[in-house]
Amino acid sequence: MKWVILASILCCLALAGIVSGADESMNETDDASAMEVIADEAYTTIFVQEGAGGSFVKDESGNYTLTITGVIPYTLYFSDRPARDAGIVEMDQFLEGFSFHPDNPPNALVAIREGEEESDMIVVELTAPQYDGTNDTLTYQAKVIADYEFESEWPEDLIPRADDAIPEEFGKVVIVIDDCPCLPYGTCDSKWRNSCWHVYICRPCGGCCGN
């Protein structure tokens, strides 16, 4: 299963310490000239979270509360060329630095295990994250979407596994969140700017988003 392979590779990279060099390089380039380079180069970053199980609970609006239990207390990120960055960030810091604004929420693939051999993909928009580090629990408000578009090419191989059936409870889960969303910045006609992941935060990096 591709999502299992993806998660395993990412976790192995983190545990092996390979990502530590990426963190150091990002700190070294935290200046205005580096941000100009980032602004000129188009690349995407994806973010991976993992848990031991969870549930989808439907509310009166038809949306869901997505609860992840046994969640690993960090988010893993990586990007393609030209940045080729990879690293891990503490869950609290990620949720604070990433935008889950309801006007432009990020798309995500929720890859879940049902039983011993079945797996499903559910495509959602995520808002209102809440992390409880004491109980290893992460919750989102999730809206299931059929008309979706990902900035990154990474989820493309996984999307065909998307399933309309939403299980109320499930086993092992991996959440793949797509890139930094556009953040309100007020300088473009659209009043949104493209954002880049830099030093553990989504920051405006130039160019107007198309929404």
Image (tube, rainbow, N blue to C red):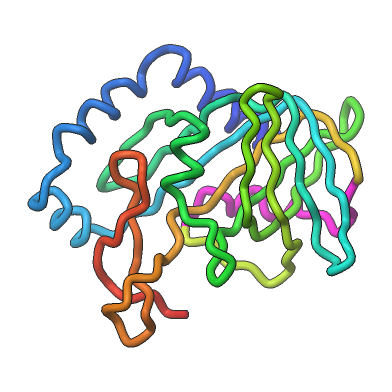
Residue under the image location 52 percent in, 53 percent down:
178
Measured as percent of width and height from the top left, residue 60 is found at: 89, 66
Residues rendered magenta in the picture = 152-167
Position in image of residue 135 (x %, y %): 71, 23
x, y percentage for residue 133?
Answer: 62, 26
> In the picture shown, does residue 155 fall above or below 93?
below
User: Quick one: quadrant of the N terminus?
Assistant: top right
Residue drawn at the location 12% of the way across and 45% of the way down: 31
Q: Residue at x 29, y 61 (%)?
A: 204
Q: Is residue 159 magenta?
A: yes
In which quadrant of the rendered view does residue 132 lie? top right
Q: Based on the displayed image, in which of its 4 quarters is residue 176 positioned? A: top right
Q: Residue furthest left?
A: 33
Q: Is residue 83 above or below residue 149?
A: above
Along the horizontal axis of the image, is 124 left or right of 38? Answer: right
Residue under the point 38% across and 74% down: 192
Query: For residue 185: magenta?
Result: no
Would residue 82 be found to the left or right of residue 161 on screen?
Answer: left
Q: Name the foreground residue: 159 vs 45.
A: 45
Q: Quadrant of residue 112?
A: top right
Q: From this view, report whether residue 136 is shown above or below residue 81.
A: above
Does residue 141 appear to the left or right of 182 in the view shown? right
Question: Picture coordinates of residue 130 (x, y %)?
Answer: 64, 43
